[in-house]
Image (tube, rainbow, N blue to C red):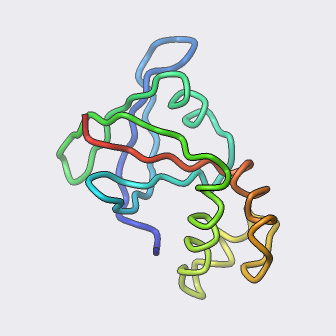
Amino acid sequence: MPLGPQALLTVRGRNSGLPRTTPIALNPHGTGWLLVSVYGRVDWVRNLRAAGEAVVTKRRRTFPVTSQELTTDQAAPIVRDLLASLSPFVRPVIGSYFATDISAPIEAWQDEARRHPVFILTPA
């Protein structure tokens, strides 16, 4: 599962209520997308958890989406597979945000999944 195409995620701020936009990489998943927070529990993660919905902009098209955060058990293999699929040029950059080696057991990846939330975005 290589990093997907770039897009923009716009989420209502949990405190201000104002729209906040950040660049993201989406990975196709069923009728929606998987979204992995490579940088951890950043503001867009907290905003998405609070709002439960957002707008994705891809190639000048916008899609209202609902979000569902995966459990650590569900997210661990996704995070591991994402890192394993990265090219040798990208892996050192993205991998520097993760403390676990790709060959580590799934329990170690559950710790990573706690630090790097994974969401499923479904078109609303």
Residue lying farthest to the bottom in this orientation: 88
- Residue situated in front as seen by the camera: 120 or 36: 120
Q: Residue at x 35, y 64 (%)?
A: 5
Q: Position of residue 88 (x, y in %)?
A: 60, 88
Q: Residue at x 80, y 77 (%)?
A: 104
Count the labels in the image: 0
Q: Position of residue 69 (x, y in %)?
A: 54, 41
Query: In the figure, 95 relative to 42: above or below?
Result: below
- Residue situated in front as seen by the camera: 32 or 13: 32
Left or right relative to 105: residue 6: left
Query: In the figure, 43 relative to 51: above or below?
Result: below
Q: Residue at x 55, y 17 (%)?
A: 14
- Residue situated in front as seen by the camera: 100 or 93: 100
The C terminus, quarter of image:
top left
Residue lying farthest to the top in this orientation: 16
Query: In the figure, 73 relative to 55: above or below?
Result: below
Residue lying farthest to the front in this orientation: 73
Q: Residue at x 55, y 79 (%)?
A: 86
Q: Position of residue 74 (x, y in %)?
A: 59, 55
Where residue 29 sits, quadrant-wise, is bottom left
Q: Position of residue 13 (x, y in %)?
A: 50, 20
Query: In the figure, 98 relative to 43: above or below?
Result: below
Left or right relative to 22: residue 117: right
Where residue 44 sits, quadrant-wise, is top right
Where residue 103 sits, quadrant-wise, is bottom right
Left or right relative to 70: residue 94: right
